[in-house]
Image (cartoon, rainbow, N blue to C red):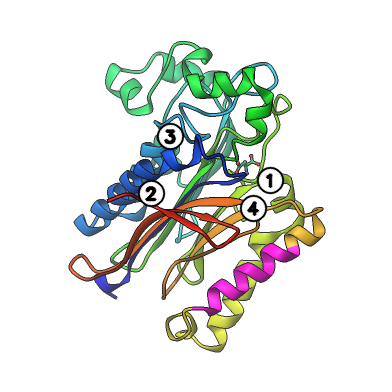
């Protein structure tokens, strides 16, 4: 396997389309895409590429992750993040506090622990409060909860009508590196004004995030309870595995096949969840990335090919009407 297999797909949330907010995501989707791609071309492992993309979006107030994450019912931004490698190591961190880059904390934990699912403990917070300036900077440490509340989010909170139309802005990224290995990550503030302690699908391995080098990598965004109770990601992984067993080349030969699987399962989720849902992005072990969604819009970026022969390279907002808002050049 060589560089021809490089692939990145990322999302910056799915939900309602807000003409005042949603298009502003485009330059950051582009920046995140380029950040991940550059790492892959340099030969970095997938985790480093995913982290690079997630950090761009976690730092930006237009996305519901890191700085700009939605607060819970008490006004506190509690973040959730899940990272998984295709060799099936993972870190899932729940209720992360006072850091802009939960994906970097998770990646460093993965290096140390390999596999861990944990809530954000008092000890963890203390260890970062007492860490060196270098570590604090890497994690985007802030002294107060309020420091993660972006002006845009505060405005949305003051104007609940506007918050209704803001759409979700969870961020996710899946990559395939030059050795054909997959890596996925999802980072979120969860739903706006969530019940204190509520956890959605985003950090849940096998739901909001999953990777297996023999099958696929994926990340989701949308109504977490619907993703979890419909087992959307589980059914998709199972279907992809079955197709690959029948023909390992199937997704290379038929570019539409993966999309058909995703679209069908997203419809099933909506049927079982009163029409609710969101979006899923997937990279199969071989073949092009794909996505499906059932919301008014999803924000996306993808690139694949080789360092010198890129076959797709775009950041866009896809609307359910079929219209696509592209980057301005
Ligand atoms: N899936 C996330 C959650 O339920 C929210 C989102 O994707 O916007 O926490």
Would you identify the image quadrant in which residue 174 lies?
Answer: bottom left
Residue 50: mark in rendering: 2
> Looking at the rendered structure, which numbered label has been put on residue 54?
none
The residue pinned by badge 3 equals 58
The label on residue 295 is: 4
Q: Kindly identify which residue carries mark 1.
A: 223
Of 317 and 257, the residue lying toward us: 317
Instruction: Work out whether 296 lies above or below 78.
Output: below
C-alpha span from label 1 to label 2: 23 Å
Q: Position of residue 271 (x, y in %)?
A: 80, 61
Question: Which mark lies nearer to you, 4 or 3?
Answer: 4
Asked if residue 306 lies in the magenta stretch, the reply is no
Identify the mark nearer the N-term, 2 or 3.
Answer: 2
| 283 relative position to 134: left or right | right
How far separated are the C-alphas under marks 1 and 3? Answer: 19 Å
Instruction: Say whether residue 294 is left or right of residue 7.
Output: right
In the rendered image, the vertical position of residue 322 relative to residue 76, given as above or below:
below
Residue segment shown in magenta: 256-268
Name the residue located 60 percent from the left edge and 58 percent from the top edge.
Answer: 320
């Amino acid at each position: 396997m060589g560089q021809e297999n490089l692939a990145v797909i990322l999302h910056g949330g799915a939900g309602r389309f807000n003409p005042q907010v949603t298009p502003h995501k485009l330059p950051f989707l582009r920046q995140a895409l380029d950040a991940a791609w550059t790492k892959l071309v340099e030969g970095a492992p997938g985790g480093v590429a995913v982290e690079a993309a997630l950090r761009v979006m976690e730092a930006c107030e237009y996305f519901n992750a890191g700085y700009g994450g939605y607060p819970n019912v008490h006004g506190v931004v509690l973040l959730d993040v899940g990272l998984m490698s295709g060799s099936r190591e993972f870190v899932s961190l729940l209720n992360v506090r006072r850091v802009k880059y939960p994906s970097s904390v998770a990646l460093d934990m993965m290096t140390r622990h390999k596999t861990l699912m944990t809530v954000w403990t008092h000890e963890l917070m203390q260890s970062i409060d007492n860490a060196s300036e270098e570590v604090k900077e890497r994690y985007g440490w802030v002294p107060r909860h309020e420091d993660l509340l972006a002006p845009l989010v505060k405005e949305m909170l003051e104007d609940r009508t506007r918050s209704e139309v803001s759409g979700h802005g969870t961020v996710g990224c899946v990559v395939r590196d030059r050795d054909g290995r997959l890596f996925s990550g999802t980072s979120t503030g969860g739903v706006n004004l969530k019940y204190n302690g509520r956890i959605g699908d985003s950090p849940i391995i096998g739901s909001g995030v999953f990777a297996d080098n023999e099958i696929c990598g994926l990340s989701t965004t949308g109504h977490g309870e619907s993703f979890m109770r419909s087992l959307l990601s589980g059914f998709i992984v199972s279907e992809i595995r079955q197709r690959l067993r029948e023909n390992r080349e199937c997704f290379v030969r038929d570019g539409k096949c993966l999309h058909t699987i995703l679209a069908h399962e997203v419809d099933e989720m909506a049927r079982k969840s009163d029409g609710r849902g969101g979006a899923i992005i997937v990279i199969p072990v071989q073949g092009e990335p794909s996505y499906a969604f059932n919301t008014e819009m999803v924000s996306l970026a993808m690139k694949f090919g080789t360092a010198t022969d890129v076959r797709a390279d775009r950041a866009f907002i896809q609307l359910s009407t079929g219209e696509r808002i592209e980057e301005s050049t």
